[in-house]
Image (cartoon, grey):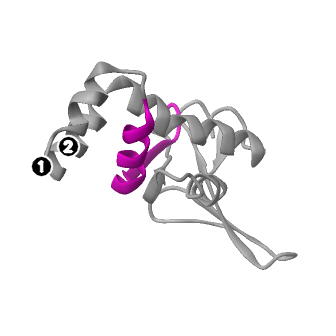
């Protein structure tokens, strides 16, 4: 293995010929950034994803660009909030997606598949 410029350890797995990127968090815990990105990109709400992890952070930080169409689709079927019903009548699609993203139920819905996918992929708690 070797250290990358941003302080991560890059290990080359000779058996699978696969590059693994492992980062060390502030508390000294190791996390597999590549495994997180590979797993979490399967979420129906992810358009693009990047996971940041280094020794300045207590836990990994996933940065997600949400699939707007998937979030709008969820909003059309969700009945958990009066606010969602109000966004359905909004004609401005950019404003509409921002209104939906501001709703707590929508945020929970976007996070929900990450938890399920992480468990299925065998990711550990900080991952």
The answer to which quarter of the image holds residue 96 is top left
Using the rendered view, name the quadrant where residue 14 is placed: bottom right
Task: Say which element carries label 2.
Answer: helix
Image location of residue 62, percent across then percent down? 46, 46
Write the start and end of the magenta stretch as one range: 57-78
Please indicate whether residue 84 sits to the left or right of residue 56 in the image.
left
- Answer above or below: position of 61 versus 67: above
* Residue holding disc 1: 92
Residue 22 in which image quadrant: bottom right
Q: Is 83 left or right of 60, judged from the image as shown?
A: left
Q: Image height check: is 9 above or below 75? A: below
Residue 92 spot, x, y in % from top left: 12, 49
- The x and y percentages for residue 31 are 65, 46
- Label drawn at residue 81: none
Q: Give the residue pinned by disc 2.
A: 96
Q: Is residue 14 above or below residue 125?
A: below
């Amino acid at each position: 293995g070797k250290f990358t410029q941003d302080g991560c350890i890059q290990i080359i797995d000779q058996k699978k010929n696969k590059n693994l990127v492992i980062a060390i968090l502030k508390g000294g815990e190791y996390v597999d950034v590549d495994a997180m990105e590979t797993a979490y990109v399967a979420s129906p709400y992810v358009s693009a994803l990047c996971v940041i992890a280094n020794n300045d952070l207590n836990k990994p930080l996933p940065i997600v660009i949400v699939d707007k169409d998937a979030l709008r689709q969820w909003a059309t079927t969700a009945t958990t909030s009066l606010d969602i019903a109000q966004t359905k009548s909004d004609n401005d699609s950019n404003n509409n997606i921002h209104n939906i993203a501001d709703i707590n139920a929508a945020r929970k819905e976007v996070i929900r598949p990450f938890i399920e996918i992480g468990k299925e992929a065998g990711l550990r708690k900080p991952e």
